[in-house]
Image: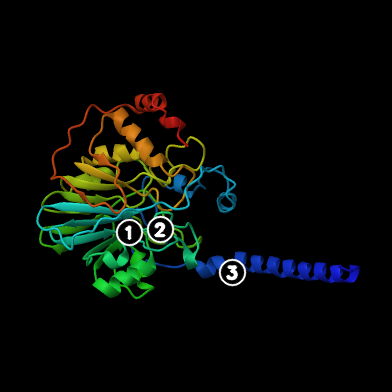
Amino acid sequence: MSPSSLKRVLRSIAVVLLFACVAVCLVITIAPHFLDRIYYRGPVSTHFDGQRFVNPDGDRDVLRAPGGGSRAAFLWRYLTGNDGRAPWPAHIAVHKKPVAARVAGDAMVATWVGHATVLVQTQGLNILTDPIWGRTAGPFGTGPKRVTEPGIAFDDLPKIDLVLISHNHYDHLDQATLKKLWDRDRPQIVTSLGNDSVIGQVGVPARALDWGGRITIRPGIDVIVTRSHHWDSRWFTDRNRALWSSFVVTLPGGNLFFAGDTGPGDLTWPAQAATYGPIRLALLPIGAFRFQPGQMRSDTHIGPIDAAEIYRRLGASRAIAIHWGTFRLSYEAYDTPPRLLEKVLRCSGTSGFMTAKIGQPLTIAPYAPPKRETVAERGDLMACLRMAGGLALR
């Protein structure tokens, strides 16, 4: 290349970089206001300041970047893979079994579809939690890629009657999936305040309730929106414009509890769910808890240790571990959450908390009051985990 040609190339690169710099500056100054949304307007409460929702047990933890430092630095490390994360497989095979069209009476069958998506069938009702069939969990087809295909192909999904949406993060509120469900089945969609606005962007109606709100689905079957400890955002600037929640579905054979996505917070919130009646099945997240070496939980996601404690505080008869092994959201290895949970349950003498296989329907036993040993102090539990090699898991 001649010197003159080289100068032209360098000049072109400089112009491109200049325009790119100007574009970035414009995005920084304009986009935050453009991307902000008002999803909800209502009276001030213990968890709504008139503009944004808050955790009544404190928000300092969920405002920090995972693992410390700035959010920009965290995002850069995450996107570039320069964060010391354990490797994940590129694809996990799924062996699916057919699901029934309906399950009558007090019988209950639960099928983990992947991530926080679970099909629960009982009383002739088909309930679906945080459904996502998308290949990625993010805006415009970006975001973490699914490494495990859905445990039920969408076309094999039975007619859905009830959908629970815990909050508006992309891995829990997938507009494309909700649109397909609505067009096909017209299910009742229940969520917490403000998320109906997000769902409504694709022409799908939803019923939004505050914590403690209740809606009757059928006589004896209600959905109650209950507290959790989390946060909301579709973009960076609309943070906490909508509310996050867990759910209780009251059922004649024992209630269903769906935690959605949650950190531990003050760990008092499971007690509210327990007041609505005995819990036959709890759906509890155990993954995406590690953003730095040795971390046992993040501030917005519980890990196996806190999941077992929440299970105990709920007084649930059975639980299924969810929110792991589908989308790579954090630093722990693919199978660390279930391996650590197994050690936690052994060290704490806890039974009835199951690790399901995606696509494998599980028959849930009738409710029975849990029989559990004396609760281990956290220090004793950690000592047992250290001896069992749980603290060494990546």
Question: In the shown orientation, is residue 84 left or right of residue 175?
Answer: right
Q: Amino acid at mark 1?
A: Asp
The residue lying toward the viewer, choosing from 256 and 144, is 144
The answer, for residue 317, to whether it is visible in the render is yes
Residue carrying label 1: 130
| Residue 47 vertical position relative to residue 135 in the rendered view, above or below | above
Density class for disc 1 (Cα within 10 Å; few <14, some 14-19, many ≥20) is many
Q: Amino acid at mark 3?
A: Ile
Q: How many marks?
A: 3
Density class for disc 2 (Cα within 10 Å; few <14, some 14-19, many ≥20) is many
Residue carrying label 3: 30
Q: CA distance from mark 3 to mark 2?
A: 27 Å
- Contact? badges 1 and 2 (CB < 8 Å): yes
| Residue 144 vertical position relative to residue 368 in the rendered view, above or below | below
Sequence-first disc among 3 and 2: 3
| Residue 129 vertical position relative to residue 323 in the rendered view, above or below | below
The residue lying toward the viewer, choosing from 250 and 275, is 250
